[in-house]
Image (cartoon, rainbow, N blue to C red):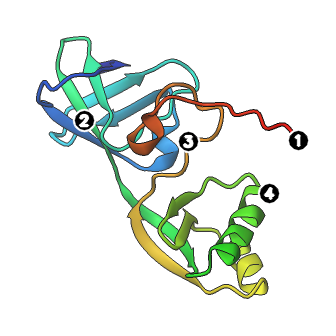
Amino acid sequence: MVVLESLCEGSEPAADSLLLGYADRCKSRLRTRLASGEEAGLFLPRGSVLRDGDRLRARDGRIVEVRAAPEALMEVGSAEALRLVRAAYHLGNRHVAVEIGPGRLRFVADPVLARMLVGLGFEVAEKRAPFQPEAGAYAGDHRHGDEAGPARIHSYHR
């Protein structure tokens, strides 16, 4: 069994990949299989959340790349930013993990949430795609893309 126990940086090519849905990417302990079919055990610090493209180092030195598996999602969209913010508010108020994209929000398929959004005047579409929700304000230093810049706190005085 391949034991995966730490995130790694660098450009060394991955020897294998690990396809996981969002719920499994939130687990710090998991018995699973790599794309090659080899059995693997995930042993990460509690609270770790893996993102698509993360790289894990195995005890034997191999690098394994994490891939987000397609899963059942729901999508609400709007060209009007204020309407989209309203949908995001209602989902966030229910502590729902949300992926934010240009003119759209995605969340794990849930008919109760879909009915709520339809009741608010939105159209909700079913999708099958990899899910990459926002990491959250307190996610720590494990950031990607545009989020990776330095944090700044501004103070405004009247």
- Residue 139 % position (x, y): 59, 32
Counting from the top left corner in percent of width and height, residue 123 is at: 62, 87
Q: Earlier in the sequence, mark 1 or mark 2?
A: 2
Where, quadrant-wise, is the N terminus in this rendering?
top left
| Crowdedness near tag 3: few (<14), some (14–19) or many (≥20) residues, C-alpha within 10 Å | some
Q: Amino acid at mark 4?
A: Asn
Is residue 69 visible from the viewing direction of this image?
Answer: yes
Q: Which one is earlier in the sequence, the residue at label 4 or at label 2?
A: 2
Q: Say which quarter of the image contains residue 91.
A: bottom right
**Which mark's residue is nearer the viewer, 1 or 4?**
1
Q: Is residue 47 above or below residue 80?
A: above
- From the image, tell me which residue sits under label 1: 158
Nearest the viewer among 143 and 2 is 143
Please tell me whether mark 2 sits on a helix, a strand or a loop. strand
Asked if one can make out residue 111 in the rendered structure from this viewpoint, the answer is no
SS under mark 1: loop
Q: Nearer the viewer, residue 76 or 18?
A: 76
- Which label belongs to residue 93? 4
Give residue 67's position: percent from left, percent from top: 30, 45
Tell me the mark number nearer the camera, choosing from 2 and 3. Answer: 3
Number of the front mark, 1 or 2? 1
Identify the residue position indicated by label 3 in the image. 135
- At 19% from the left edge and 12% from the top edge, which residue is drawn? 60
Spatial CA span between label 1 and label 4: 31 Å
Q: First in sequence: mark 2 or mark 3?
A: 2
Q: Earlier in the sequence, mark 3 or mark 4?
A: 4
Residues under numbered marks 1 and 3 in contact, where contact means CB atoms less than 8 Å apart: no
Q: Mark 2 sits on what residue?
A: 65
Residue found at x 56% / y 30%: 151
Quadrant of the rendered image containing residue 2: top left
Counting from the top left corner in percent of width and height, residue 122 is at 67, 85
